Image: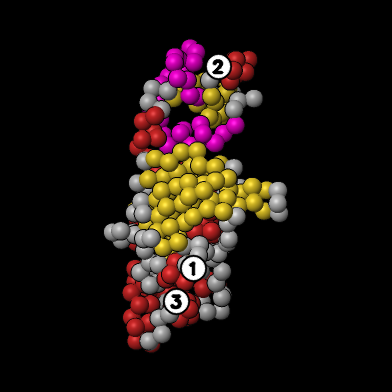
């Protein structure tokens, strides 16, 4: 288990990116879900030993990742949000270079490792192609391959599906789920709810540098049982509904507002029907501002 305690970070003496984050991350796929600017990337960079916090602890297997950085990096695989590549290198050359940086010095060992990683992420046939010509999905697959060098016990993946089309996102989900080994902690930081609902057995929601919830996705959905409603209403009723319940989405359907709302005690009004809650309902209920 990865344990984060009292983590704080302020930029420029004014912007509080993290406000005393406490988080227990079990083995398996763990989703860190939050809107852009919520502190996800700051938290991931600190855990990845790339950024110093103002205060707090990050521990795994009795190792303080913040003070024992060499030990931490030997157990870490990291795919950042912006994964820089040398466009003139091939996929094979890229992994060869990164494997050397991670201490795999023996040529035969490195060659075998690279072949196995390319096979694992389905890039064997593109091993001689320059990565500058790779699609977004191919670049992310190569990013996963480099994160797996050294059989890390902690893997951090920051916003991996941002910019991918639905088909590439589906392929990446499959790849990521296949990479999880027993006992490995994988943190998936994202603002895309489907990434978490499709992949993660545990999750946390962060907003404005604070953890709002930490639970299993199924538990989150159960909390909204019999509380989510959907209906089409006249425009002049919208403000009244916002005063009585939380509107989590609003669309125009047939020229009228179609609202999805959370109402804890009763049907919001005529025309509303109960619907099955989703993880997105839970997420939006926590991170969306109160109805204006």
Report the coloring of the rendering. Answer: secondary structure
Tell me if 109 is positioned left or right of 239 in this view.
left
Q: In this figure, which residue is indicated by the disc labeled 3?
A: 102
Q: Along the line of sight, which residue is nearer the eye, 254 or 152?
A: 152
Which residue is found at the position 60% from the left and 31% from the top? Answer: 289
Asked whether the residues under the numbered discs 1 and 2 touch, taking CB atoms below 8 Å apart as contact, a structural biologist would say: no
* Vertical placement of residue 10 versus 105, above or below: above
Q: Which tag, 3 or 2, sits closer to the chain's start? A: 3
Of marks 3 and 2, the one in the foreground: 3
Looking at the rendered image, the quarter that the N terminus falls into is bottom left
Which residue is found at the position 49% from the left and 59% from the top? Answer: 47
Asked whether the residues under the numbered discs 1 and 3 touch, taking CB atoms below 8 Å apart as contact, a structural biologist would say: no
- Residues drawn in magenta: 261-289
In the picture, the disc for residue 244 is 2
Q: Badge 2 local density, few (<14 within 10 Å), some, or many (20+)?
A: few
Of marks 1 and 2, the one in the foreground: 1
Farthest residue in the bottom direction?
107
* Vertical placement of residue 26 versus 49, above or below: above
Q: Secondary structure at mark 1?
A: helix
Query: Residue 125: x, y in percent?
Result: 39, 74
Mark 1 vs mark 2, CA separation in Å = 51 Å
Q: Badge 3 local density, few (<14 within 10 Å), some, or many (20+)?
A: some
């Amino acid at each position: 288990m990865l344990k984060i305690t009292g983590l704080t970070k302020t930029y420029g003496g004014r912007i509080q990116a993290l406000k005393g984050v406490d988080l227990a991350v079990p083995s398996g796929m763990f989703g860190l879900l939050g809107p852009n600017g919520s502190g996800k990337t700051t938290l991931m960079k600190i855990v990845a030993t790339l950024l110093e916090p103002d205060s707090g602890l990050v521990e795994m297997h009795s190792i303080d990742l913040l003070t024992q950085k060499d030990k931490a990096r030997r157990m870490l695989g990291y795919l950042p949000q912006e994964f820089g590549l040398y466009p003139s290198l091939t996929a094979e050359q890229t992994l060869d270079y990164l494997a050397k940086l991670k201490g795999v010095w023996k040529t035969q060992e490195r060659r075998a490792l690279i072949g196995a990683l390319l096979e694992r992420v389905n890039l064997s046939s593109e091993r001689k192609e320059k990565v500058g010509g790779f699609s977004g999905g191919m670049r992310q697959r190569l990013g996963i391959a480099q994160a797996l060098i050294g059989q890390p016990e902690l893997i951090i993946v920051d916003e991996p599906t941002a910019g991918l089309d639905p088909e590439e996102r589906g392929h990446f989900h499959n790849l990521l789920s296949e990479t999880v080994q027993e006992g490995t902690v994988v943190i998936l930081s994202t603002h895309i709810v489907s990434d978490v609902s499709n992949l993660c057995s545990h999750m946390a929601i962060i907003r404005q540098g604070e953890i709002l919830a930490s639970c299993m996705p199924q538990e989150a959905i159960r909390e909204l049982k019999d509380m989510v409603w959907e209906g089409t209403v006249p425009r002049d009723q919208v403000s009244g509904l916002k005063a009585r319940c939380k509107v989590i989405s609003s669309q125009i359907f047939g020229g009228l507002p179609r609202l999805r709302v959370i109402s804890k005690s009763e049907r919001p009004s005529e025309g509303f029907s109960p619907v099955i809650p989703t993880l997105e309902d839970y997420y939006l209920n926590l991170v969306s501002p109160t109805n204006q």
